[in-house]
Structures are given as C-alpha cells and as structure tokens.
Image (cartoon, helix red, strand yellow):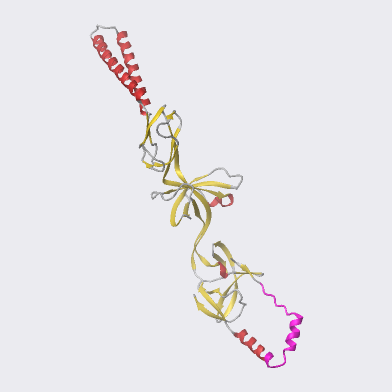
Amino acid sequence: MIGRFSRHYILPVGLMVMVTLSGCGESGNAAGEEKAVRKKRAVNVIVSPVQIRSFTNYLNLVGEVKPRRRVVVSIEANGMIERIAIKKGQWVKKNTVLAEIEDDLLQAEIREAQASLKASTLNLNNQKKLFDQKAAAESAYLDTQYLYDIAKARLTHVQARLNKTIIHAPISGVIDDRFLEEGELAIAGVAFVEIVEIDWVKIVAGVPERYLRYVQKGTEAVLNFPAYPDTIRVGRVTYVGTTLDPDNRTVPIEIEISNSDNILKPEMATTIRVVKDYIPETIVIPQDAVIDTDQGMVVFIVDGNMAKAMPVTLGSVSQDQVVVTEGLDVDMPLITVGHRDLVNGELVDVKEK
C-alpha cells in the first residue's frame, strides 16, 4: 500500500539547554564524533532493475455454483407406486426407469382393447371383400372402417396411459431429492423426484454497474474455489442480465464450465477474475516502492552511491504492482527495500535482489 511520509525536525528549548550544559567535557565530544560517523554511514538498500513487461489488472467477483439444469419429475398416472428403482444422491442416465405405478386395471383395458381391435380388423377385412365383389354396399364398408378406426384409437390411448405408469429420467443427472415412497398412492401431477444436471454447472454472480463495461457475453473468466484451493477452472460468460438489481446495483451474469469430475457442488462458493486492463508492454514496479509525499509520488533509485528521488506518474494498480507511465527508464536501479527513511542524496550500500 502506498504510504504517506513527511519529516519534521523540532528542537525543544529544554533540549537546547541540556545540549549546552553537557557540551563541556569528553562525553560531549564523543557524542559529536558518534553523530558524525552515523551521518556518513551508508544505508543498506536492495535494488531491482526497472523492467518492461506485460501488465494485467483483474476485476474480482464472488459467485455461487448452480446446476446447469434442475428438473422436477412429476407423476403422470394415478395409482399406487409399485416400485422405486433409484435412491437419493444416485446418478442416473437419461431415460433410466425411476419408478413404476401399479397398472393392473390398465393391463385389463389393454387386453380388452386388443380384442376389440382384432374383431374390428376381421370385420373390416370381410366387408372389404364383399365390397370388392359388389356384394355389400359402400356405406356398410365405411361403417366397418369407422368402427375399426375407433378400436385402433382406443388401443393407442390405453397404451399411452399404460406407458405413463413407467417414470423415466428426462435428463442425465443426480437425484437431488425424492418426495414419494413405495406403496404411496400417487396422483397425476404430484412431484416425485428432482434431478440436477452437474456434469456442467453454471456460476452465478452479480457485477456492480460501474464495472459492467468489462463483462459481456463471451468474456473469459478464471474461477477459484475455496473448497479446492488448487482447483482452477476457466469459462466464458454465457449470460448477462438486462435488469439491474435496485438493492445492490448489480447485474446478474452466468458462466458455464465443465464439471466432469463432479467435485463442484450446487451452492459452493467461488471467486471470479475477469480482465479489466491488459497492457502488453509497460514499466511495472512494486507498489510498495512508491512513496506518497506532499510533492507527489516518488521512488528512489541509486545514482552512483547515493539515493536519488524520482517523481513518477502512476497508471493502473493491480494487487501489489503498479504501472509507471512517466518518470522511470528501463534498467534504472530501483530501490525496493530500505527506501522508507531515505532522503535525497543519502549514501547507500546496494544489495542486488
């Protein structure tokens, strides 16, 4: 952090009297000689040559992990739950059978509908032969065709109802919750299980309005997770909201990333870094090397064997690094340690970093 310093030298009256009284004698001479030696002693400093390098400044956000999809699977047929084939927390593939509803009555209806269709098919075939032989009126043939169509439609309808007694997973994912048990009477429309898709997850965060210009659809983001400090994921913004939250003045964003190892869990915290500024070549120095004085920002370099104060103009700041736009040249020996109490022209003893 850039610190402010100033020096004030005040010599109290009482101290002047003490110096006058003690000025006589050998002790006073020794103190004066020690002061002179200390004044000539060089200050130990560490220097680092000024260099040009790339500079990246990040926007830091906080977000949460959410499943990419969350689907509630409901019962589609009335009846008792005869069998449940899954458990809470189990991963299931799309179209996996989740449960079966008792279907005895529907099975009886199926048999009846099949028999009716069989009889209608025979009648239709007979009427077709008679009609082709001119032995039956067209109206009789059409009536038989109509009855056949009704029998066929009825079988299709009953079969569709029967199919609904077998509940399938509409997506691949994890059974996050289950609301019914075997033996319970199920009613069409009642929720049975909730499935979350976590092979891919989305990161949800809010961007303060003053930083919204740095984030748009497609912007790359680097993600870290407190639960897994060594895990880093990279994704891109897939959604930027259109409405500002009036309470916290943020706009919602979403970032989709792969979670094939399934280590990321819904509601897990994450930190997000988005590039604000990128400068491919510029002078970057440690922020701690800069001193904020009454005359402006100053750094110290080594000139010969003395410290030389250099006024500087600063640019972007990122963590402990700062861009210098004016005041320094490449390879200047910048003092990075021991500079806090230096004065311009003071002797220094240089240690290379």
Residue drawn at x 59%, y 44% is 245
Q: Quadrant of residue 138?
A: top left
The N terminus sits in image quarter? bottom right
User: Percent from the top left, x then y, of residue 51?
Assistant: 49, 70
Nearest the eye: 317 or 98:
98
| Location of residue 157 with respect to 284 vertically, above or below | above
Residue 197 falls left or right of residue 275: left
The answer to if 167 sits in the magenta stretch is no
| Location of residue 236 with respect to 345 vertically, above or below | above
User: Percent from the top left, x then y, of residue 93?
Assistant: 36, 40
Nearest the eye: 151 or 84:
84
User: Percent from the top left, x then y, of residue 119?
Assistant: 28, 15
Residue 6 falls left or right of residue 202: right
| Location of residue 172 with respect to 3 vertically, above or below | above
The answer to if 13 sits in the magenta stretch is yes
Q: Which residue occupies the extreme front position in the image? A: 183
| Location of residue 197 with respect to 183 vertically, above or below | below
Q: Quadrant of residue 128?
A: top left
Residue drawn at x 45%, y 36% is 179
Residue stretch rendered in magenta on the structure: 6-28
Residue drawn at x 63%, y 87% is 34
Q: Count how many numbered circles sit on residues in the image.
A: 0
Q: Which residue occupies the extreme bottom position in the image? A: 25
Nearest the eye: 10 or 110:
110
Nearest the eye: 133 or 253:
253
User: Percent from the top left, x then y, of residue 284?
Assistant: 52, 66
